[in-house]
Structures are given as structure tokens and as C-alpha cells.
Amino acid sequence: MLDTPTYRSCPSCETTSFTPWVRYSQDDWQVVACVSCDLTYLRNPPGHDALKEDFAWEKTYAAKNAKSKGSTVFSPFVRKLRGVLNMYRDKTQEFRHWFNDGHVLDIGCGWGQRILAPMTPYGIELSTELHKISDAAMRERNGYCLHGAGAEAIWEFGEAQFDGIVMFSYLEHETHVMDVLKGAHRALKPDGAVFIRVPNFGSVNRWVIGAKWCGFRYPDHVNYFTLATLTGIAKRAGFETILVNTFTRHVDDNISVLLRKSAVP
Ligand SMILES: [Zn+2]
């Protein structure tokens, strides 16, 4: 069941004035750009309870895939090649470039398979079914998974508990972005880092393809970041942003960044 719609101000700078993105709004979902910091966001996101069951990402993802593969200017062959490469890429080995081996939290961890040995996995998962699966998997590897919304559950972990925090295809779903980023800042060790991967609203694909771009998903994508707006909100939460996919940024449908605690908060 849908919660009563609530209208939010900019999740980055809290400005209430916005410019509607009429061509990117669909049905009753209002996609707007903040007039102050330029962040594009869904103004009337569903509540967490609705997302937990009605809009669980695994359902909308399946529905979207059934309808269309999600458009990009790249050919089906390149998409398939990317899919195969992603499947075989060991995410833990990738994260070892960015974090010390140790305690690593995966927010929106899905099945709980992204963080493997030698790291100790912790997770937060909103979907009831996926949480059960990931908690069981993580307990076998000496960690555990909390059931709930990232912006709330992250505050249940200890201060400076984690060497690394992963937000992989998560932050675009989180209505309370600032709460989760500040929570991550608190839960991170001083030399730790946050890895973030989100759809790239600044990509060439989005400019060329417009409303049919594969990054749009209604209503479960509630924030549409460019590198600039992601850097801006991270700075407000006390982080410096380092771009990971430097060379492919403009043509990549995703942005990957690493956040480190700013020297001066
Ligand atoms: Zn703003």
C-alpha cells in the first residue's frame, strides 16, 4: 500500500525551490532539479514501508527488464560483453584496492555476496527476503546483516567500526541521503573509505536518449547524481570525493567514486 505522498526539499542543500524536469517525470512521479545546487531528485518518493514490499527493487527491475532492456547508445553486443565482465569481476578484490582488509559494511547488500574473505562482511538490506539470505551468508563469515533502511540502520553500528563502506547501486534509492552519508562518516575509521556507484545523470547516454535512458526507474530511483552533485552532497557530509572511473565518466551509465573523510570537517 502506498504511503500518503510527501514532498521533500532538496536532499543535499534543503532548498525548497526547484525546476521541474517535465520530460523526465512519469505518471505522478515528479522529477525536479534543485535551483540552488542543481541536484536532480524525485520530489515525492514513496516511504520506506512501501519500498520494502510494493516497490522492492528486485520486482521493479524484473518488470523493467521484461518491458525493455533500458536504452543506451551502445549496441546489444557491448551490453552483453559488459554483463559478462561484471559477472566475473570479483568485487572484493576490487574493494581491496580502496580499503584495508577488515570490517566492511555493504549498504543495500542484496544477497550479501559482494564482500568476501579476507574481509569481514556486514550489511543493511531493506527487502525482507533478501535480508534473510544475506544475514545467513554473512554470519557464516563472522559478520551480520541488519534489516531496515540504510539511513536509519547505519546508526546502530559502532563509531569508527568500519575500514570500508560500500554503497553499490544503493544511494540512488535512498530518500534520506544526508542521514546515511553522515552515518557513514561516523561509522568509518579515520583512514577508511566509502565506495559509491550510482547511475550517471551526467552521461552522454542520458543526454542523447532522454526519457528512455536506462538510469530512470520510477519510483525507486529517488536521486539522479552527476559527479558535481554527488561531490557536493558528500562535501556537506564531511567527505572528499575521488573519481574512480575517470576515463570513462562521460560515456559510462554509472559513476564510481571513493569518499574519504575531509581533513577539515
Ligand atoms: Zn540543492
Image (tube, helix red, strand yellow):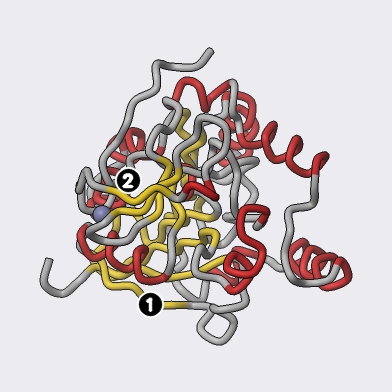
What residue is shown at x 55% (from left), y 59% (from top)? 199
What residue is shown at x 61% (from left), y 60% (from top)? 210
Q: Quadrant of residue 238?
A: bottom left
Looking at the figure, which quarter contains the C terminus? bottom left
Ligand 1: does it lie within 8 Å of the C-beta at label 1? Answer: no
What residue is shown at x 38% (from left), y 77% (from top)? 242
Quadrant observed for ligand 1 in the rendered image: bottom left
Q: Amino acid at mark 2?
A: Val
Residue 229, percent across and down? 34, 64
Residue 214, percent across and down? 67, 55
Q: Amino acid at mark 1?
A: Ile
Residue 100, percent across and down? 42, 70
Mark 1 / mark 2, whichever is N-terminal: 2
Task: Identify the mark at residue 180; answer none if there is no mark.
Answer: 2
Judging by the rendered image, the residue that carries numbered circle 1 is 242
The answer to whether 186 appears left or right of 54 in the picture is left
Q: State the residue lying farthest toward the front.
A: 22
Q: State the residue lying farthest toward the bottom.
A: 247
